[in-house]
Image (cartoon, helix red, strand yellow):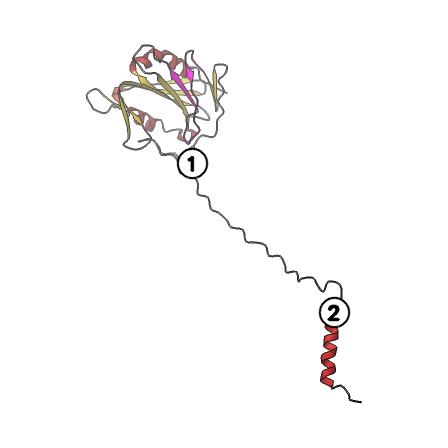
Amino acid sequence: MTQTPAWSRVVLFGAYAVSVLCITPGCEQEQVLPTVKPVEKTTRISPPTPAALPPNHPPISGADAAPATKVISHDGVLRLTGIEMSIPEGWVQEAIQPRPMAPVAVFRLPAKSKGLKDGAVRITYFPGMKGMDEQNIERWVRQITMADGKPATRDDAKTETVNLENVRITTVDVTGVMRMSSGMPGEGNTVSNSRLIAAIVDHPVGPHFVKATGDAATIEAWAGSIEDFLKSTQTK
């Protein structure tokens, strides 16, 4: 009887072992690879470009910008941060488009005579500009050119300061050719025979800035109510 070689017995045993393993449960299943967590991509978002300041505007930092203010004036009272002001009869409140450095309130002053344009009152809030009264006064005066073509000076403007309870109001009143700024240096339209009444309304969490502009005749017709509006300021 012929004996099987040793090497042949080893091959047969290996084949038998593989066959046994392959009939065990799970042999036919594919190998499960470990899950690899995908690498998350980080997108860097650049901050929005701040709006350009009007020409000659005192510099303000991001921290100086006014926080969001909810203005309520349905009952004839304009409620702002830290103060309240009585809205004169006849003033028309305008909608405000949200944007950087937007005013907190805008009113239209209807023209009293045909052929004249309506005036406007804009209220802004920059508490970081406290103590910069002189810079703002100079800026407002420089927006006016006199009839002889020369820039207005402090001598051409009427300046007055009134102290109320916890409120100091400084007003500047000047008439001439006004440059209406577009927000870009060197750009803007000029309007002749214009009048500007601007005020710094300073208070513990102020200041607010009130600026009335328009045809000289229109602003003159509303000058009394502008003064009443300013002097109605009360802290809250």
Decide: is 39 above or below 53.
below
Dominant secondary structure of the magenta stretch? loop
Q: Residue furthest bottom?
A: 1
Q: In the visual, does 174 lie left or right of 104?
A: left
Q: Nearer the viewer, residue 150 or 171?
A: 150
Q: Is residue 63 magenta?
A: no
Percent of width and height locating residue 179? 28, 25
Query: Given the image, on which type of amino acid does mark 1 rest?
Result: Gly
Q: Quadrant of residue 123?
A: top left
Percent of width and height locating residue 23? 75, 67
**Image point (74%, 85%), residue name:** 6
Query: Given the image, on which type of amino acid does mark 2 rest?
Result: Leu
**Image point (62%, 57%), residue name:** 35
Percent of width and height locating residue 82? 48, 23
Q: Nearer the viewer, residue 159 or 28?
A: 28
Q: Nearer the viewer, residue 53 or 128?
A: 53
Query: Mark 2 highlights which residue?
Result: 21
Query: Mark 1 highlights which residue?
Result: 62
Q: Which residues are magenta?
A: 87-110
**Image point (42%, 36%), residue name:** 62
